[in-house]
Amino acid sequence: MDTKSLDEYIQVWQCVGCGRIEAPQTCIGVCRDKKVFLIGKDTHERVHDELVRLRNEIEAVRAKLLRFTQCTPSDGQFENSFRALQSQVRALVDNLSRAAT
């Protein structure tokens, strides 16, 4: 089975009352159905893992930004502090760039 077929949706009909699922068409009309789409377990798990990874990346970015908002350089150390923060942000951006590929 190729990857494309794993990413395809399966259209089914789900009863709004009992939750019963039928495919490829609705039942004889006793229930009230709505169209829903399902995906394969492998696709779901791959997307879930990516979501967890992205949430972790966002938390790392948030922590760095919070650190930036809470720092107060010592007298005469503004430039050194600024350069250190620049370096940390560059490293964070590099990590995000690598993770995106």
Image (cartoon, grey):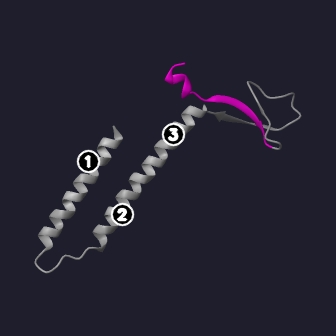
Tags 1 and 3 touching, CB below 8 Å = no
Dot 1, crowdedness within 10 Å: few (<14), some or many (≥20)? few
Q: Is residue 7 magenta?
A: yes
The residues bearing labels 1 and 3 have C-alpha atoms spaced at a distance of: 23 Å
Seen at 51% across and 20% down, the residue is 2
Tell me the quarter of the image containing the N terminus: top right
**Amino acid type indicated by mark 2:** Ala
Indicate which disc residue 63 carries: 2
- Side of 42 where 66 appears, left or right: left
Dot 2, crowdedness within 10 Å: few (<14), some or many (≥20)? few
Spot occupied by residue 85 in the image (x, y as percentages of width and height): 21, 63
Residue position for label 3: 47
Above or below — where is 43 with respect to 67?
above
Seen at 89% across and 34% down, the residue is 30
Spot occupied by residue 51 in the image (x, y as percentages of width and height): 48, 46
- Which region shows up in magenta? 1-16
- Side of 23 where 4 appears, left or right: left
